Image: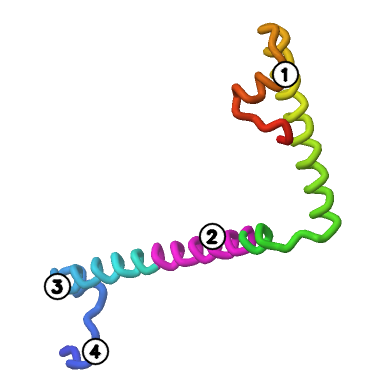
Amino acid sequence: MQQPQDQLPSSKDSDKDPQAEQHNDKTTSLQSTITNLENQIVSLQTQIQEATSKLRGAFRSPTPSQTVRDHIRLLHDYNEIRDIGQGLLGLIAEKRGVRYKDVLEEFGVDADD
């Protein structure tokens, strides 16, 4: 019995045909590559969404009450650091037996700072 020309060869025939086997190998390889690339796309889209969400959260305008709280906290921190610095400068002046104002000038600090 003879096979019609438009009919594809059976799997037994393709196993014996090196070109068909090579074609099947390439097809399988390409399908695997496509699947890997699709997975990478999904992963990258997820990363983009996460980064976008983080950026939106980071650039939200603070409420007025949050701004006031932040300002008060920063002033508190500044005052603590200033007090420590003044205490150290006072200790230096006392140890050297000079005026506090002289130590301020030596370190380049204005009395109003």
Task: From the image, tell me which residue sits under label 2.
Answer: 47
Estimate the x, y position of residue 27 in percent, counting from the top left: 28, 71
Mark 3 residue element: helix
Q: Amino acid at mark 2?
A: Gln
Q: Amino acid at mark 4?
A: Gln
Residues at badges 4 and 2 in contact (C-beta under 8 Å)?
Answer: no
Q: Residue at x 21, y 93 (%)?
A: 6
Task: From the image, tell me which residue sits under label 3.
Answer: 19
Q: Residue at x 24, y 89 (%)?
A: 7
Task: From the image, tell me which residue sits under label 1.
Answer: 100
Q: Amino acid at mark 3?
A: Gln
Comes first in the chain, label 2 or label 1:
2
Estimate the x, y position of residue 75 in percent, counting from the top left: 79, 41
Relative to residue 1, is residue 88 drawn left or right? right
- Residue 90 is covered by the magenta coloring: no
Decide: few, some or many residues near mark 4? Use Cα within 10 Å; few <14, some 14-19, many ≥20: few
